[in-house]
Amino acid sequence: MGNETLAVQLAGIEKRFPGVIANHDVNLNVRARTIHAIVGENGAGKSTLMKTLYGMHQPEAGTISVFDQPITFRSPSDAIAAGIGMVHQHFMLADNLTVLENIVLGAEPVAGGVIKYDDARRTLQAIMAQSGTHVDLEANVSDLGVGQRQRVEILKVLFRGAKILILDEPTAVLVPQEVEELFGNLRRLVADGATIIFISHKLDEVLTVSDDITVIRAGTTVAEVKPADVTRGQLAELMVGSELPSPHGRTTEVGTEVQLEVKSLTVTGPGHKPLVDDVSFVIRRGEVLGVAGVEGNGQFELCEAILGQVKPSAGSVHIGGADVTGASAHDRLVNGLSYIPFDRHREGLLLEFPLWENTLLGRDANPEFLKGPFIDGAATRADCRDIIEQFDVRTPSEVVPAYALSGGNQQKLLVGRELSSDPQVLIAAHPTRGVDIGAQAAIWDKLRVARDQGLAVLLISADLEELIGLSDNIVVMFDGRINARLTPGDATPELLGTYMTGGLQEVAS
Amino acid sequence: MNTPVSTSAEGMAGFFSRIGRPRSGQSVLVTLASSAAAVVLAMLIGGLVLLVTGKDPVEAFSKMVSSGTQPYKLAEAVQRATPLIIAAVAVAIGFKMNLFNIGVEGQFLMGMFWAGVAGAYVELPPVLHVTFCLLIGIIAGAIWAGIAGLLRVKRGVNEVIATIMLNSIALALIDWLFNDFFRYENPGNLDVRTKPLPTSAWMPTLFTVTSKTDGGGSVSTDVTSFVLIALLVVVAFWLLIYKSQFGFRLRASGGNAVAARTAGISSNRMILTAMLLSGGVAGLAGLPALLGTTHSYGPTRPDGYGFNGIAVALLGRNHPAGIIISALLWGFLDATAGPLQIAKIPQSIILVIKAIILITVVIVNEVVNRKMAKRTADRTAAQLAAPVAVTA
């Protein structure tokens, strides 16, 4: 890097939270007028690092320099004063105000108590012309789409004079065309002298847009690379620290006995077209059927219908050969159905309850846990301890409330609960979403063991690697229908992606 | 899916049930201390109010303590606490299911009225007769609360609104029924009442506490044996909610309705059952007065049990022991109102203190909950990190 100016330099940053180190020995060199990507897994410490840089908390050790000046940030306003702006992942805009009002909010140019909107408008028009980021200043924010809201956020930051922009997972909410537009805007900002710090875990985007990449793993920066020097696979390995744990490989055979059969299932939404449209499939003993699809294409409703939470308007569901279309959710669960839900906090856990009551949820009809009408506390706690041990849930004990555990450990507990009721059929929705790599490997392992023992699994996942690695067969859902059926051998992420966006329709089989 | 329309009132119920629910992992000591802190804070603010209005707060509080701690006044506190314990349990059952039953007031009046009317027209041996009256009270209260439960389940009507409305309807309905059908003609007596209950339906006095007055006479308080039933209700509440499978499902459903539903627990059934249970218990709250002292229903009925029950449940944080302690505190405060009046200190200061306790308990609990949640999370993280050598 030689004698180039560094817009931001972090050296030896350490940030501890009670009992844990969130960041240690973090070193970051962001060259001025570049797009610098920071990549890492969920929980690797990216957010902690960015909060340090934006003055939201103070590091225990290390130094921060901005344009070669050592500096201490006591609060975000110090960071803003130093020319750093943050575009948050979750937009912080007031819906009922106009774009202009939102942008000036908190930094209003005033004269005699009156906001000088005309001045602000002139300034903003200059900024927009220069950066190529255009939004109708008089529009109500409530009328704007996600992409435009993000532009408002960026303008907000530029209006405050930021020269260094931090974008936290900016593409998470955008559709592909908007991503392209955003990248165009970012390049233009850089050409005009801005510096961009771009946080992401989408490797393809990072490789496309950035000039430099810093990889963060387990709380520390482990590598700084140029996009031209690494492949996607190498970058992924840097992120996880070892060869990617592969979900591949099975030595057992898929059985013949059909455990879950869904016939022409249709679920109608409020009003218009069906959410699940004429979906049929079978899953045999020991088989994993993967469902690929962009979220919101009927996967959730499909699961709800199989679980008995919504009534299908047509079609039937069979578990172990028995028609359960009319059975209650409770009866289905008692008769061998298990469910790892889409959203563990919403659908799976009682966050304020101790772990042992969480592992009891849904299994309380089991006579093992009852003494007459009362819960057998000792037996239930012992069972929870077993799950904690078998599924390697990191917790001091079974009496801590569920909210105190990390996401990965919560998920392991949930998977343990669902597999402990000896199910014949498991619906696993994003079983490893938002968990660290260690927990992911552990969960894959447990699923594989259960499958080898004859469990039929319906696997819904956005992680194509997981999907291809674990599934024996894959279907793609688009717009409520199954628009492709593949075997993992034929499925590449690219091909799946095409089906998932409806770009290609397989001839109906 | 028939999800009830979310209203801001629902958010209110959620808020109240949240503050009424100490986080698990929070020690009893912290819970006790935070409630005690709320009470002390309320006393201080109440004292300030007295000071501002030109009264001596020290004199007022010493009067409260000196008069309130006389044996017969302590007995009165127990007597006054009895219906509040029952009403608070009724409210707490609702809170455990994330329901805000504001309608305990109407439910207890319905229970009292129908138990008084029905009990007067049957002849039964002593113990059975009392049991009969209790059952009628429970059924009447449960039906009245059940209406709100049905409205919630079938039509998505928020139970806060439904039970408030049902309170007014209960009052009007009872007045009409009383005036047109059940007024007991008793010539020469201006005190209009329903037909008196036969003595077989009376609850006996458990004990009488007598104190000497300054003038050399004596005053006494009868403590009705209904206090034993109140304690029984608390024990049953504890067993049912905290120990039974049903209670687990109820708490799970109240704690996270979606997760409970996903686990096969029908939230509609839980809502209905919780309302029926809550109303059934509420239906008992008027009976200490009916069966123990007045022995008939009349327009000079007790009131405010429902609303004071909410306060007691909140202060006691829906916990069995907390409810008993809070109800006794409420009873104590009420019992000192008379002596304060005599000492020319406005007894409305009792109301002010009670109101401030409510506000402070809400605030203190919320603050403590947040702090404790953070501490529990941090401590758990620390316990996990401990075995691994932390390298600086």
Image (tube, rainbow, N blue to C red):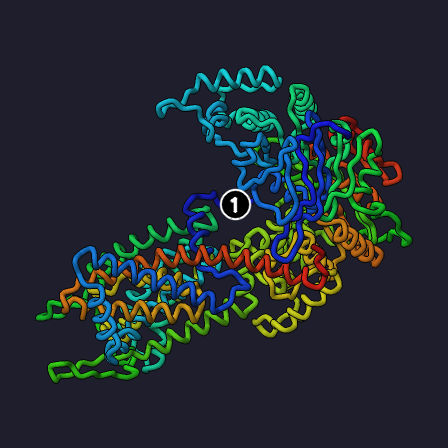
Q: Residue at x 53, y 45 (%)?
A: B2
Q: Position of residue A360 (x, y in %)?
A: 63, 63
Quadrant position of the C terminus of chain B in the picture:
bottom right
Q: Position of residue B340 (x, y in %)?
A: 18, 68
Looking at the image, the residue that sits furthest to the left is: B188
For disc 1, the neighbor class at 10 Å (few under 14, some 14 to 19, many from 20) is few
Q: Residue at x 56, y 35 (%)?
A: A79
- Image: A209 above or below A380: above
Q: Chain of mark 1?
A: B
A227 vs A393, left or right, is: right
A134 vs B95, left or right, is: right
- Image: A4 above or below A246: above
Q: Residue at x 72, y 60 (%)?
A: B389
Q: Nearer the viewer, residue A162 or B295?
A: A162
Residue B197 in view? no
Residue under numbered circle 1? B3
Q: Nearer the viewer, residue B203 or B314?
A: B314
SS assignment at label 1: loop
Q: How many marks?
A: 1
The kind of residue tagged 1 is: Thr
Q: Position of residue A184 (x, y in %)?
A: 68, 21
Quadrant position of the N terminus of chain B in the picture:
top right
Q: Position of residue B225 (x, y in %)?
A: 32, 79
Q: Nearer the viewer, residue A320 or A404?
A: A404
Residue B206 in view? yes
Q: Residue at x 40, y 64 (%)?
A: B35
